[in-house]
Image (cartoon, grey):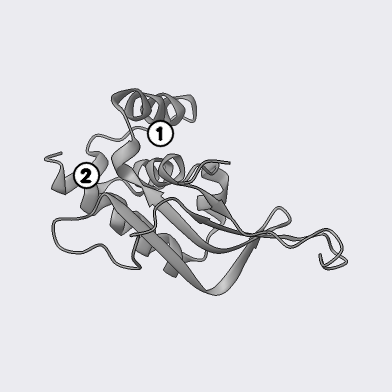
């Protein structure tokens, strides 16, 4: 496991009977709840109430937008086209921003789609802020 990723998981003996897994993904030590002005490349979202999806409980997710490449952007557009979705302007497309955030956190876009709206909005706002900051 690399230094830049930290997964907090309960040991099998301590795991609840429903076998839910608790995950906290933090990709950098300096990641903060809110990006500072001019530093929108990394955003850590801490859930006020743990979010559970597909047997995994998320307490926090870190979105490292800085690590994304042009190939990732094209991949997002391709994924959207396969679903008959098109983003004429990614900086205003919630679907594009959600898929970009999923790539930045190393999770599936289905996880993003299942988030409570309040968390979804904060995360996609961070993605939009990054796009605008990088001149998109």
Left or right, 123 with respect to 108, comes to left
Residue pictured at 36% horizontal, 64% vertical? 122
Q: How many marks?
A: 2
x and y percentages locating residue 19 in the rendered image:
82, 59
The alpha-carbon separation of the residues under discs 2 and 1 comes to: 19 Å
Residue pictured at 15% horizontal, 39% vertical? 136
Left or right, 7 with respect to 79, comes to right
Left or right, 102 with respect to 10, comes to left
x and y percentages locating residue 76 in the rendered image:
39, 31
Residue pictured at 40% horizontal, 46% vertical? 101
| N-term-proximal mark, 2 vs 1 | 1
Mark 1 Cα-neighbour bin, 10 Å: few <14, some 14–19, many ≥20? few
Q: Tag 2, which secondary structure?
A: helix
Q: Quick check: 123 above or below 70?
A: below
Q: Tag 1, which secondary structure?
A: loop
Left or right, 72 with respect to 128, comes to right
x and y percentages locating residue 129 in the rendered image:
22, 53
In the rendered image, the quadrant that contains the N terminus is: top right
Q: Quick check: 5 above or below 9?
A: above
Which residue is under mark 2? 131
Q: Quick check: 129 above or below 74?
A: below
Which residue is under mark 1? 85
Residue pictured at 50% horizontal, 48% vertical? 5
Mark 2 Cα-neighbour bin, 10 Å: few <14, some 14–19, many ≥20? some
Quadrant of the rendered structure where residue 124 is? Answer: bottom left
């Amino acid at each position: 496991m690399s230094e830049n990723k930290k997964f907090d998981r309960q040991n099998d003996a301590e795991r609840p009977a429903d076998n839910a897994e608790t995950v906290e993904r933090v990709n950098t030590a300096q990641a903060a709840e809110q990006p500072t002005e001019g530093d929108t490349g990394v955003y850590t979202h801490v859930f006020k109430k743990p979010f559970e999806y597909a047997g995994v409980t998320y307490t926090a997710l870190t979105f490292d937008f800085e690590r994304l490449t042009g190939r990732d952007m094209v991949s997002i557009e391709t994924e959207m086209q396969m679903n008959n979705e098109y983003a004429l302007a990614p900086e205003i497309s919630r679907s594009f921003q959600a898929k970009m955030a999923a790539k930045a956190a190393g999770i599936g876009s289905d996880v993003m789609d299942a988030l409570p709206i309040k968390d979804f909005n904060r995360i996609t706002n961070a993605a939009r802020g990054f796009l605008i900051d990088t001149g998109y």
